[in-house]
Image (cartoon, rainbow, N blue to C red):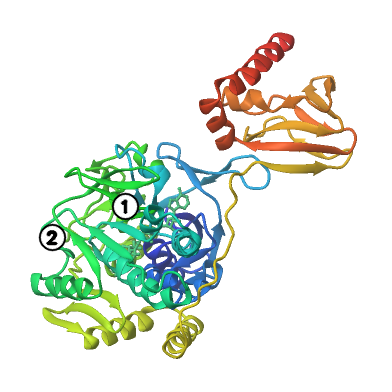
Amino acid sequence: MVGAKKQIVILGGGFAGIYTARTLERMLRPEEADICLVNRENYWVYQPMLPEVISGSIALMNVVCPIRRLCPRTNLVMREVEDIDLTNRIVTVSPGFRPRAKKIPYDYLVIALGEVTNYYGMPGMLENAMPFRTLADAITIRNHVIHVLEEADCEDDPDLRRKLLTIVVGGGGFSGVEVVAELNNFIHEVKKNYRRLREEKVRCVLVHSRGRILPEMAEPLALFAQKILKKRGVEIILNDRLVAATSEKAILKSGLEVPCKTIISTVPSANPPVLQKLDCAKDKGSLLVTTALELVGHEGSIWALGDCVSLKTVSGKVVPPTAQHATREATTCAANISAAIRGGKPAQFTFEGLGTLGSLGHGSAVAQILGVKISGWLAWMLWRNLYLFKLPGLKSKVRIGIDWFMHLLFPADLAQMRLEHESGIKNQHFEPGDIVFHEGDLGDSVYVIEKGECDVIKEEEAGPKLVATLQAGNYFGEMALLSDVTRNATVRASTALDVLLIPKGDFNRLRQSVPAFGEVFSELARKRTGRDN
Ligand SMILES: Cc1cc2nc3c(=O)[nH]c(=O)nc-3n(C[C@H](O)[C@H](O)[C@H](O)COP(=O)(O)OP(=O)(O)OC[C@H]3O[C@@H](n4cnc5c(N)ncnc54)[C@H](O)[C@@H]3O)c2cc1C
């Protein structure tokens, strides 16, 4: 019904989602619609500058902007999208501190969840290769590379040293080329700080499946980029691809094996799992949309855009997955939602790109703008100015400008940030009366009591009923995990309680690797189910 306040839900806070929200905030009056955006982070990442985070030429917090500041009229839900119910128009997002799923109803839905790197069918890649898309990926890669340099510096075994000093990057598109260029520059810059590595050879290897890198660019520019990278010592392997990995080597389709301790892979891409299971029109796994960005079969209520869609312009050209297209798609999408609310005619997507730019670092880049091909320093200046100009907000522009200036004056930073936890297994303490979990909560962890006691309470018609009291050495919480159901009782600390918390992911990993471990919990669940009956 035209006139009633609408609920617009946007899934994804990347280029596509953020620009849609910002445009809708400008186009619609607050009384016309509420805008809600779901994203797993509370910040938006400026991906084209991510490679420079690895080398430290841009400080890591300077490539992100808080979504709440970018979209002040939008309600941000910082959660994981777990399910999209197209029939009942409800989005389910992951639990937060309280382990209970949240349901968000919508009148109009925008799907802009981007893509993920997918190692399906590539043995060992998941465990041994690092993807490169997010800020967390950039930090992980930076930390890992500094770690291997530190190890190589104190390692005496020459074979291991060689492996530690070899980096393999899969995918010769923009992100692969930019990451290998930045890493190669970074390592050569900081090598002098490692006394035993000064004379050592560092191998940066780029593997690409086609006959030349940068397939998005004209051949002369791609060849220029290849020449620059080779001059700087990057090895380029063409017409081959990464197919598997172990902790000791990268394995290519041709059978070639590269002994190494660092593999970064920017390919292949696929839609996020929540979209893979979505029952709707698709083209090779990507969501199929009309030229008005409406999800085929759901015209007028669901729009999809950005990297997760298969889209053609009005003239039939395939739209590539780039930020410049995602931002233009966002404008069309917002205009069409506004038209749906106010009763207008949908706009069609016609933008066919202004050009492409790729940085090679150290004052060199390749650019193809409105048919004009530029390479070298001029292209690099163009790249920096254009991306700085496109960055929203004066604060971010100033910060990045200062970072670049500082990098001209001072050497790259070498400090490693040790953030990562080996697993999510942790100790937790509860005071008497604290609730560990409620009946009806999602089962997200198993608990082992180390010290103290707790009560297991079931809600019955007559009131709460004490089912059991558990003590040190007892386990609980396994039933909801083993049978994927919600908690069937509330657990409350009756004394000061210390538990070991094993999150679902770790619990399942342990069960798979140590069947006896899983059997203990399965047996316990069987006994407890019997007692319940
Ligand atoms: C390293 C790198 C360099 C690039 N350089 C350029 C460049 O120079 N020029 C250019 O035009 N393009 C570039 N691109 C491509 C460009 O960044 C993408 O095309 C663009 O980001 C696509 O926008 P999007 O909104 O569709 O997806 P994304 O920007 O990937 O955003 C998707 C968002 O959805 C969130 N999300 C995903 N799944 C879930 C879930 N289940 N629950 C909650 N949130 C979820 C993600 O956290 C993310 O915030 C680059 C990409 C990379 C990785």
Res 271 visible: no
Residue 266 shows which numbered tag?
none
Question: Could you tell me residue 240's position as x and y percent?
Answer: 17, 50
Question: Measured along the vertical axis of the image, is residue 42 above or below residue 461?
Answer: below
Residue on which the image places disc 2: 317
Lateral position of residue 48 relative to residue 352, left or right: right
Query: 515 above or below 526?
Result: below
Counting residues from the start of the chain, the first of labels 2 and 1 encountered is 1
Q: Answer with the quarter of the image where residue 520 lies.
A: top right
- Name above or below for residue 95 compared with residue 372: above
* Residue on which the image places disc 1: 308
- The quadrant of the rendered image in which ligand 1 is seen is bottom left
Please, what is the three-letter code of the amino acid marked with disc 2?
Lys
- The local secondary structure at tag 2 comes to loop
Check mark 1 vs ligand 1: CB closer than 8 Å? yes or no.
Answer: yes
Q: Which residue is drawn at 44% across and 85% down?
A: 407
Whether residue 472 is visible to the viewer of this picture, yes or no, is yes
**C-alpha distance separating marks 2 and 1:** 17 Å
Q: Which residue is drawn at 65% across and 35% down?
A: 445
